[in-house]
Amino acid sequence: MKYVVIGGDAAGMSAAMQIIRQDDNAKVTTLEMGEYYSYAQCGLPYAVGGLVKGGLDDLVAREVETFREKYGIDARVNHEVKHVDIDEKVVSGDGFNIPYDRLLIATGASPIVPDWEGVDLDGIHSIKTIPDTETIMNDMKKDPRHIVVIGGGYIGLEMAENFVEQGKKVTLIQRGPQLGTIFDKEMAKLIHEEATDHGVNLLLNEEVKGFKGEDRVQEVITDKQTIKADMVIVAIGVKPNTHFLKETGIHLHESGAIKVNAYMETNIKDVYAAGDCATQYHRIKEHDDFIPLGTHANKQGRIAGLNMAGSTRTFKGIVGTSILKFFSLTLGRCGLSQKEADALHFPTVIVDAEIPHHATYYPGAEVLTIRLMYQRHTEQLLGAQIIGKEGVDKRVDVLATALYHKMTMEDLENLDLAYAPPYNGVWDPIQQAARRRG
């Protein structure tokens, strides 16, 4: 059986490894358009910040030679697939044509960079790959003092933090009214305060129009002003790498991601997709969504590989869980935001609370700002957002588990959660919040 995997990172190599383990006769070819396999994209901002002590090498989980020599995978680099012939079952690019019996598309996503005037000037970067990060780190050796970050999502916030921690003057531009748009506006105020408290020049409701400079960027032009810039990071989102599939008949989501079923199958026989180029079923929304994260990519890749090799395994879906460190705060959320719930016409009730993360008589208690949202008639939990300095991750994971199992607010009260004064109160903060519902 000839298996071809397009993409050599999380989803692609998770699938390839499962195929090798499940099918003793498998002939697996993986095609990566870059030069790196299996690396931790989420660690890239921290490499720029100097927190990854071993440098970018520490972010590579397995070298390409390992896949070739240890596992017998025909792992190729600098092989960009430009066409898929679903009738002849062949993938092709510059100088190669490779037949397949079963195909996995795991091409990931790329940063969105608008066609702004001057966007090609030196010093303007996006960050998604190891080469991207190497370029930024080399540029940092020129000691840029004024850095502009465009975009207030996860990558933008992480990059802003890491630059500030290196003593840079950072301006953060967000086109809309708030940072962290996956949070409700009431919670986003805490993010804004944290940014300004750490010296970030925060510009909301401001739109970038272009850049000026002599070969290298010197200014960012917005609809309101001109901003000095020695370096610019563009972090306004990503788009699935599916442009080469337009003539295949493969069904795409409105986001451009490939539509897949629970088995990671597309609508074309023997063609699968997984990771940041594919959809994810959202268990609360009860429809396909596009939330590209490494956690989903690894799970979907593993499931795709098992199914391609003849096993039967389904992807159970997501509940929109994510977490972020931003200076002294941890920002966590799962389920739906108020905006998402309104779009789905869910009748909702919201509980807001500020509760210490452990027993107040034990030293070091920090306040958790908690927002729980539930369905008015059934009291089913629909979403949760927590921001604080300590204890956020523990609660978000409990709430994500509750969302996965469609638990109610009363169910939250009844959970048997760990308690000792250094870690918790006799009633966990999320249970205390649940008890405050009307």
Image: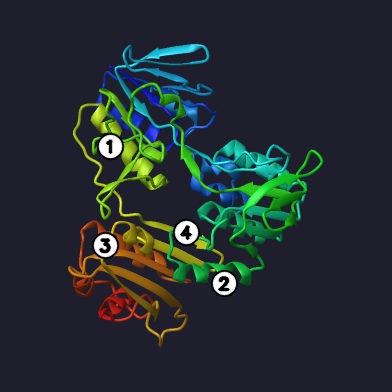
CA–CA distance between discs 3 and 2?
A: 30 Å
Q: Is residue 148 left or right of residue 31?
A: right
Q: Is residue 129 left or right of residue 369?
A: right
Provide the residue designation for mark 4.
181
Count of number-bearing discs: 4
Q: Which tag is nearer the camera, tag 3 or tag 2? A: 3
CA–CA distance between discs 1 and 2?
A: 41 Å
Q: 28 or 412, which is in the foreground? A: 412
Q: Are marks 1 and 2 in contact (CB under 8 Å)?
A: no
Which amino acid is tagged 1?
Ile
**Helix, strand, or loop for circle 4?**
loop
Q: Are marks 2 and 4 in contact (CB under 8 Å)?
A: no
Residue positioned 65% across, 64% down in the render: 200
Q: Earlier in the sequence, mark 2 or mark 4?
A: 4
As drawn, 237 above or below 325: above
Q: Is residue 166 visible?
A: no
**Helix, strand, or loop for circle 1?**
helix
Q: Earlier in the sequence, mark 3 or mark 4?
A: 4
Quick one: label 3, few (<14), some, or many (20+) residues within 10 Å?
Answer: some
Provide the residue designation for mark 2.
193
Provide the residue designation for mark 3.
346
Which amino acid is tagged 4?
Thr
Q: Which tag is nearer the camera, tag 3 or tag 1? A: 3
**Helix, strand, or loop for circle 3?**
loop
CA–CA distance between discs 3 and 1?
A: 31 Å
CA–CA distance between discs 2 and 4?
A: 15 Å
